[in-house]
C-alpha cells in the first residue's frame, strides 16, 4: 500500500503540473456559465474543522476570472476542463443534481482525500470528456456505480480507499469485468482497498480489454490466486502492485517477460514456492518488494551489472544462503531490506560500491564475520544490522564521513569495540545493546547532541557515571544502560529540571542503584521506567503514582519492604507493574485510573514477596482490567474471592504457592471461555472438586492444580480445552480411571497425574493418533494396574527423534500475548519432576525434555516394545511395579537416555550388553529384581554405585562385592525351571571319590575288632614319637580311658 500511495502522489503531482502547463498556454477568459456553476459548487461545500488533514477551504472570488481560481484550469475557449479539489477536508455530500456534473467540458477531476458523505453519486457519466478521474480516499462508500464504466475516454482511474477493518467500496454489480470492459484507453488503474472478491482466473481475464494498461494497483482487494497466465497479454504493464491479497501461489515466471516492468510489489500475499531467478535479471526493474511472505523461498544468484534495481525488499521471507559479492553491481541501489530471513555468511565487501545507498536493513539473520565498510555510502541514513552473529571491530567505517546518518541499530551481535570517529551530528538513534563492548563508558556519546534514542544495555561497560552527565543530551527521550558493570550515581543534587532530558523511557536495570532516583519527580513525560535488579532499599515512594504519563513500571528484584502509604484509592495510569522478588509486606496497593483511556492494564506481578493478607475483598481498576496477574510465592490466605471472575480480560492468573483454602470458584472455569489461557493454583490448600464446567470454546493453555486437596474425578468437559499444553493435577486426592477423554487434545505436552488415587488400566479405546506432542507423562504413585499399553494412547511423536529439528534453537513452553505495537509478555511454564531419585523443579520446560514416570503403581507383564521407539527419551522410571521378563535389549537404542530406573520389579535374566551403548546415562537403578549373571564389564555400568544393583541374588561383578565364578547363592526357581534338571558331573565325581575313600577306613574300624586295635596302636605310636609329652599324659589318664574303651567294646 505504501508503494501505491507513493506512486499515486507522484502521479497526481506530475499529471497536475503537466496539465496546468499545457492549459495555461491556451486558456482564455472564463465563460460566465462556467463561473456560475463553480460558485454554486463552492456554496454547497461544508468542511470538517476536526479533520486530521489540512483545512484548505475553497475560496473563489466571483470578481476575478474563474480560470485563475485555485484548482481550476480552462481551455482556449474559457471552458473549465480541469478541477483539482484534493485534500480540502470537504465533508458535504455530492448528489446527482450537483452543478459539478454540468461542467461537461471537464477532462480532469480530482476529489481525492476529502470527507464527502458516503453516498456515491452516479452522475459521473455526464462528464463524458473525462480522461482523468481521481476519487481516492474521498469518503464515498458502497457499490461503485456502473456509470463510471461509460467514461470511455478515461486514461487514469483512481478509486483507492484505505480499508481498516472492512472495505468501504465494493465491485459486485458491476463487477470488475463490467467496470473496465469499455475503458479500453486506460493506462493507469488504481483500485487499492476496493472489495473485488474475484479468483485469479476471473480478475486476470477481466483486465484483458485494457491492452494499453501501464500501471495496475489492486492492493487489499480480496482477490485470490493463482495469477492466471492471461495477465501476460498486457505487455505494456510497467507497475504491478497486488499487496495484501491472498494469492496463495508462486510468483509466475512470465513476470520476467514484461519488457517495461519497473515496479513489482507483492507483499503480504501468502506467496509460496521458489522465486524464479529470472525475476532478479529483469533489466528495467527498479523496485522489487516481496516482503512478508514467510513461505516464499529463494536465494541470490549472480547480479548482472546492467540491472536498474533501486529498491530490493525481501524481509520476512524464507530466502537463505549467502549474499554474493556481485551485489556490488547494483550501483543504483538506494534501499535494501533483507530483515528476518535466513541469510548467513559474511556481508559482502563490495557493499562499498553502493554509493547511492540510503536505507539498509539486514537485521535478524545469521550474518557473521566483520562489518564491511560503508564509508562510500555518503547518503546512508538508516543502518540496521542487529540480531546477527557479526563480530570484530567496527573501525572499518569512517563514521564521520556519513554526515546524513540518522539511525544505527547494531544490537545483538558480538562486536568488541564501538564506533570509531565522530558520528554524524544528525544521528538520533544509536543501538549498541547486547554486544561484547567493554572498558570505560564511551564518553563520546555525550557529543551526539541530536541523539533521541540510546541503548548500550547488556555489554561489559564499567565505571561510575553521574546521571547529571546526560544533561548535555537535551533531546534524549529513550535511554537504556541496563545490564553492564556500571554504577549510575543518581544522588547528584545539581540535576536541573530545566536542562535535563525529558525522558519517556528510562531503563537502569542492574546499574548498582542504592536509592530511588529523586530526580524522577520532575519527569512529567515519563512513560516507561525500569529500575529492576538493583539494591534499592526502603519504601516505594507514593509520588511515583502521580506521573500521569507513566504506564510501565518495573521495580522487581530489589529490597523494597513496603509501599509508602496510603495504599487505598491510589490514582495512577500505570498499566504494567512488576514488583516481584522484593521483601514487600502487608497488602497490595489499590490502583485506580486517572482516565478511562488508560483502563486497559496489561500486567501486574506481585510474586515472590512477603504479602500476608487475604486477597483484596473488592476489585479495583487495575485488577478489573489486568491481562496478567501473578500473586505467587507469597503468604496470601483465605479463599479465592468471586470478583476474580469479573476480570474479563485476564489471560494469566497465577496464585500458586500461597495458603489459599476453600473451593475453586466455579465461575473461574467458566471465564476460560472469555480469555483465560493460564490458571496456576498449585501449592495451596484448595479443596473440593474440579468443576465440570469447561466451555466448548475453552482457550486454556496451562492448568496447574498440583499440591492441593482436590477430590473427585477429572471433569469430562476438560476435553473441550483443545489448546491445552500443560495439565498438572498431581499430589491431590483425585480418583477414578485414566482420563481417556483427554486423548484428543493434540496440543498436550505435559500430563502429570502423580500421587492421586487413580486406578484401573490405562489403555484407551479408539484410534491411537492422540498426543503427538506429549513429552512429559507422569502417572507415578497411583493404583494403576494391568499391562502397559502406551501405543493405545497416541503416537507420542515428541519422544521420537526429529531429523529436521534444529537443536541449536531450543524452544520452551510458554504463554505469549501480543500487546500494542511490538510489546508482548510471556508466562513461563514450570513443573516439578522426579529425576535420578530427586525432585527437580523445571523453571523452563524445554520442548526436547522428555520423561515417562509410571513408578509406584501395579503395572505388570513385560516392558512394552513401543518404548524402543522413543529414541528422544531423556528419563524413564518404571520402578516399584510388577514388570516381569528380561530387561529388553532395545533400551540400548535410546541414545538420549540419561536416567533409567527399573528397580523393585520382578525382572529376570541378565543385564543386556546394549545398555553399555547409552553414553549419556548418568543414573541407573535395577536393584530389587531377580537379575542374574555378570554385570557387563569394561563399560560405564561399573561407574554406578553398588546400590544400583543390590538385592539381585544372581548378579555378580563390579560394582557388587560378589565375584563371578563362585557358587551362586541359592535362588528360588519354579519346579519346571530348565536349570533345575542340569547335573554338574565335575562336582559330583569329586564328591563320590571322597565318600568312597572315607568308607574304606571307617567301615573296618566299626565292624572288625582286630583292625580297630591295630589301627589305634599305630596311631598312638606315631603321635608319641612326635609329641613325647603327650605320651606321659596318656598314661596318666590311662585307666579312665581304658575304662571307657571297654565300655564301648
Image (cartoon, rainbow, N blue to C red):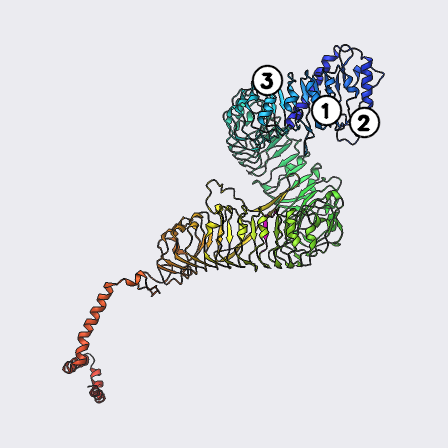
Image quarter in which the N terminus is found? top right
The numbered disc on residue 46 is 2
Vertical relation: 674 (above or below) 4: below
At 49% from the left and 41% from the top, the residue drawn is 806
Which element type, helix, strand or loop, lies under badge 3?
loop
Mark 3 vs mark 2: which is more N-terminal?
2
What is the crowding at mark 2: few (fewer than 14 residues within 10 Å), some, or many (at least 20)? some
Per the model, the C-alpha gap separating discs 3 and 2 is: 42 Å
What is the crowding at mark 1: few (fewer than 14 residues within 10 Å), some, or many (at least 20)? many
What is the crowding at mark 3: few (fewer than 14 residues within 10 Å), some, or many (at least 20)? some
Q: Which residues are magenta?
A: 699-705
At 75% from the left and 44% from the top, the residue drawn is 596
Q: Which residue is mark 1?
A: 112
Which element type, helix, strand or loop, lies under badge 1?
loop
741 or 127, nearer to the observer: 741
- Look at the image and say whether residue 703 sits in the magenta stretch: yes
Vertical relation: 793 (above or below) 147: below
Are discs 1 and 3 less than 8 Å apart at CB?
no
Mark 2 vs mark 1: which is more N-terminal?
2
Q: Position of residue 943 (x, y in %)?
A: 40, 56
Q: Which residue is mark 3?
A: 236
Which element type, helix, strand or loop, lies under badge 2?
loop
Vertical relation: 374 (above or below) 868: above
Amino acid at each position: 500500500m505504501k508503494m501505491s500511495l507513493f506512486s499515486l502522489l507522484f502521479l497526481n503531482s506530475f499529471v497536475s503540473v503537466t496539465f496546468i502547463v499545457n492549459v495555461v498556454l491556451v486558456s482564455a477568459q472564463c465563460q460566465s456559465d462556467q463561473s456560475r456553476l463553480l460558485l454554486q459548487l463552492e456554496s454547497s461545500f461544508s468542511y470538517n474543522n476536526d479533520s486530521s488533514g489540512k483545512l484548505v477551504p475553497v475560496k473563489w472570488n466571483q470578481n476575478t476570472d474563474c480560470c485563475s481560481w485555485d484548482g481550476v484550469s480552462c481551455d482556449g475557449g474559457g471552458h473549465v476542463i480541469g478541477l483539482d479539489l484534493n485534500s480540502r477536508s470537504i465533508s458535504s455530500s455530492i448528489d446527482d443534481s450537483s452543478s459539478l456534473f454540468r461542467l461537461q467540458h471537464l477532462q480532469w477531476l480530482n476529489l481525492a482525500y476529502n470527507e464527502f458523505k458516503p453516498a456515491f453519486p452516479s452522475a459521473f457519466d455526464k462528464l463524458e470528456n473525462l480522461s482523468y478521474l481521481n476519487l481516492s480516499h474521498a469518503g464515498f462508500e458502497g457499490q461503485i456505480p456502473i456509470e463510471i464504466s461509460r467514461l470511455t475516454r478515461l486514461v487514469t482511474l483512481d478509486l483507492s480507499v484505505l480499508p481498516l477493518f472492512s472495505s468501504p467500496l465494493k465491485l459486485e454489480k458491476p463487477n470488475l469485468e463490467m467496470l473496465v470492459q469499455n475503458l479500453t484507453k486506460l493506462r493507469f488503474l488504481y483500485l487499492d482497498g476496493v472489495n473485488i472478491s474475484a479468483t485469479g482466473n476471473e480478475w486476470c481475464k477481466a483486465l484483458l480489454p485494457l491492452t494499453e494498461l501501464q500501471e495496475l494497483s489492486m492492493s487489499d482487494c480480496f482477490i485470490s490466486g493463482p495469477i492466471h497466465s492471461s495477465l501476460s497479454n498486457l505487455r505494456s504493464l510497467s507497475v504491478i502492485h497486488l499487496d495484501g491479497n491472498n494469492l496463495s501461489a508462486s510468483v509466475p515466471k512470465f513476470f520476467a517477460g514484461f519488457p517495461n516492468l519497473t515496479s513489482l510489489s507483492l507483499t503480504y500475499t501468502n506467496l509460496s514456492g521458489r522465486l524464479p531467478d529470472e525475476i532478479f535479471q529483469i533489466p528495467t526493474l527498479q523496485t522489487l518488494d516481496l516482503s512478508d511472505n514467510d513461505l516464499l523461498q529463494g536465494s541470490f544468484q549472480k547480479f548482472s551489472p546492467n540491472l536498474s534495481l533501486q529498491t530490493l525488499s525481501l524481509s520476512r521471507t524464507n530466502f537463505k544462503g549467502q549474499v554474493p559479492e556481485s551485489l556490488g553491481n547494483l550501483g543504483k541501489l538506494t534501499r535494501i531490506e533483507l530483515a528476518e530471513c535466513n541469510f548467513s555468511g559474511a556481508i559482502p565487501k563490495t557493499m562499498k560500491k553502493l554509493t547511492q545507498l540510503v536505507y539498509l536493513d539486514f537485521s535478524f539473520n545469521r550474518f557473521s564475520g566483520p562489518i564491511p565498510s560503508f564509508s562510500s555510502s555518503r547518503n546512508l541514513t538508516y543502518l540496521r544490522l542487529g540480531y546477527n552473529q557479526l563480530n570484530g571491530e567496527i573501525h572499518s567505517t569512517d563514521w564521520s564521513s556519513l554526515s546524513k546518518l540518522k539511525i544505527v541499530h547494531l544490537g545483538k551481535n558480538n562486536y568488541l569495540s564501538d564506533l570509531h570517529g565522530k558520528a554524524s551530528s544528525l544521528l538520533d538513534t544509536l543501538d549498541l545493546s547486547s554486544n561484547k563492548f567493554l572498558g570505560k563508558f564511551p564518553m563520546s556519546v555525550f557529543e551526539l547532541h541530536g541523539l533521541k534514542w540510546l541503548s548500550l544495555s547488556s555489554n561489559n561497560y564499567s565505571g561510575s557515571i553521574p546521571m547529571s552527565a546526560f544533561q548535555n543530551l537535551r533531546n534524549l527521550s529513550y535511554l537504556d544502560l541496563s545490564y553492564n558493570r556500571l554504577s549510575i550515581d543518581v544522588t547528584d543534587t545539581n540535576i536541573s529540571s530545566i536542562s535535563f532530558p525529558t525522558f519517556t523511557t528510562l531503563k537502569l536495570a542492574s546499574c548498582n542503584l542504592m536509592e530511588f532516583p529523586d530526580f524522577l519527580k520532575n519527569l512529567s513525560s515519563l512513560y516507561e521506567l525500569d529500575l529492576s535488579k538493583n539494591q534499592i532499599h526502603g519504601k516505594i515512594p507514593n509520588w511515583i503514582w502521580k506521573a500521569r504519563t507513566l504506564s510501565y513500571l518495573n521495580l522487581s528484584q530489589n529490597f523494597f519492604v513496603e509501599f509508602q502509604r496510603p495504599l487505598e484509592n491510589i490514582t495512577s495510569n500505570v498499566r504494567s507493574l512488576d514488583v516481584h522478588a522484593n521483601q514487600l509486606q502487608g497488602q497490595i496497593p489499590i490502583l485506580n485510573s486517572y482516565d478511562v483511556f488508560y483502563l486497559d492494564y496489561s500486567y501486574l506481578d506481585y510474586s515472590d514477596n512477603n504479602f500476608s493478607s487475604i486477597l483484596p475483598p473488592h476489585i479495583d481498576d487495575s485488577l478489573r482490567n489486568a491481562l496478567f496477574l501473578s500473586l505467587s510465592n507469597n503468604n496470601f490466605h483465605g479463599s479465592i474471592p468471586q470478583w476474580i471472575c469479573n476480570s474479563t480480560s485476564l489471560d494469566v492468573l497465577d496464585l500458586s504457592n500461597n495458603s489459599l483454602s476453600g473451593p475453586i470458584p466455579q465461575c473461574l472455569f467458566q471465564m476460560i471461555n472469555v480469555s483465560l489461557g493460564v490458571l496456576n493454583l498449585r501449592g495451596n490448600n484448595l479443596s473440593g472438586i474440579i468443576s465440570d464446567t469447561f466451555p466448548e470454546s475453552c482457550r486454556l493453555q496451562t492448568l496447574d492444580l498440583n499440591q492441593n486437596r482436590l477430590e473427585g474425578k477429572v471433569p469430562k468437559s476438560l476435553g473441550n480445552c483443545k489448546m491445552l499444553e500443560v495439565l498438572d493435577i498431581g499430589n491431590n486426592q483425585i480418583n477414578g480411571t485414566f482420563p481417556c477423554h483427554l486423548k484428543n487434545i493434540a496440543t498436550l505436552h505435559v500430563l502429570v497425574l502423580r500421587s492421586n488415587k487413580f486406578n484401573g488400566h490405562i489403555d484407551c479405546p479408539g484410534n491411537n493418533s492422540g498426543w503427538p506432542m506429549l513429552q512429559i507423562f507422569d502417572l507415578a504413585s497411583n493404583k494403576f494396574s494391568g499391562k502397559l499399553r502406551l501405543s493405545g494412547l497416541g503416537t507420542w511423536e515428541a519422544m521420537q527423534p526429529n531429523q529436521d529439528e534444529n537443536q541449536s534453537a531450543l524452544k520452551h513452553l510458554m504463554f505469549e500475548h501480543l500487546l500494542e505495537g511490538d510489546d508482548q509478555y510471556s508466562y513461563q511454564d514450570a513443573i516439578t519432576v522426579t529425576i535420578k531419585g530427586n525432585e527437580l523443579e523445571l523453571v523452563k520446560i524445554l520442548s526436547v525434555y522428555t520423561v515417562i514416570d509410571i513408578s509406584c503403581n501395579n503395572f505388570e507383564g513385560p516392558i512394552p516394545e513401543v518404548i524402543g521407539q522413543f529414541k528422544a527419551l531423556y528419563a524413564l522410571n518404571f520402578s516399584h511395579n510388577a514388570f516381569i521378563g528380561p530387561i529388553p535389549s532395545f533400551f540400548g537404542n535410546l541414545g538420549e537416555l540419561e536416567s533409567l530406573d527399573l528397580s523393585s520389579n520382578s525382572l529376570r535374566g541378565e543385564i543386556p550388553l546394549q545398555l553399555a551403548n547409552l553414553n549419556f546415562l548418568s543414573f541407573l537403578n535395577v536393584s530389587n529384581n531377580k537379575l542374574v549373571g555378570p554385570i557387563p564389564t569394561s563399560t560405564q555400568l561399573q561407574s554406578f554405585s553398588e546400590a544400583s544393583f543390590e538385592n539381585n541374588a544372581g548378579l555378580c561383578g563390579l560394582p557388587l562385592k560378589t565375584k563371578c565364578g563362585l557358587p551362586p547363592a541359592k535362588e528360588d526357581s519354579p519346579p519346571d525351571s530348565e536349570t533345575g534338571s542340569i547335573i554338574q558331573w565335575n562336582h559330583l565325581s569329586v564328591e563320590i571319590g571322597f565318600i568312597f575313600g572315607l568308607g574304606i577306613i571307617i567301615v573296618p574300624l566299626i565292624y572288625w575288632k582286630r583292625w580297630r586295635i591295630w589301627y589305634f596302636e599305630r596311631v598312638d605310636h606315631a603321635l608319641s614319637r612326635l609329641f613325647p609329652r603327650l605320651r606321659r599324659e596318656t598314661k596318666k589318664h590311662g585307666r579312665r580311658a581304658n575304662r571307657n574303651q571297654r565300655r564301648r567294646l
